[in-house]
Image (tube, grey):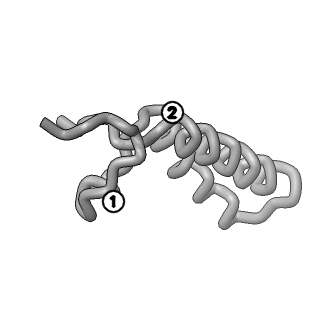
């Protein structure tokens, strides 16, 4: 359905950010910290729907 459009550094940053936000939700009770699920999932899959909408690709592969 979607092509991978996130590079390695982008994915790693998203996973770290997602884990940090979820940790805040679990330890401090910040409900907004659960938004960390979004960057965690996009980083884990390598697919960002917003990148697709705006034509952004940090993956480093050339389009055919």
Q: x and y percent of residue 58 in the render?
A: 41, 46
Quick check: 34 above or below 2?
below
Q: Residues within 10 Å of mark 2 (few under 14, many from 20)?
A: some
Quadrant (top left/top right/bottom left/bottom right) for the C terminus: top left
Q: Which mark is residue 11?
A: none
The answer to which image quadrant residue 55 occupies is: bottom left
Q: Residues within 10 Å of mark 1 (few under 14, many from 20)?
A: few
Of 34 and 49, nearer the camera is 49
Marks 1 and 2 close (CB-CB < 8 Å) = no
Q: Which residue is mark 2?
A: 44
The mark nearer the N terminus, 1 or 2, is 2
Tell me which residue sits at (54%, 49%) in the image. Answer: 39
Number of marks in the rendered image: 2
In the picture, measured across the screen, residue 3 lies left or right of residue 33, that is left
What SS does tag 2 mark? helix
Tell me which residue sits at (39%, 39%) in the image. Answer: 59
Q: Which residue is mark 1?
A: 50
Q: x and y percent of residue 32 in the render?
A: 66, 66
Tell me which residue sits at (81%, 60%) in the image. Answer: 29
Q: x and y percent of residue 63 in the render?
A: 19, 40
Quick check: 58 above or below 55?
above
Q: Residue furthest left?
A: 64
In the picture, measured across the screen, residue 45 lies left or right of residue 49, that is right
């Amino acid at each position: 359905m979607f092509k991978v459009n996130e590079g390695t550094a982008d994915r790693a940053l998203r996973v770290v950010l997602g884990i940090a936000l979820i940790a805040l939700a679990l330890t401090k009770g910040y409900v907004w910290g659960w938004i960390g699920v979004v960057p965690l999932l996009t980083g884990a899959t390598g697919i960002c729907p917003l990148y697709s909408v705006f034509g952004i690709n940090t993956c480093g592969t050339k389009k055919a």
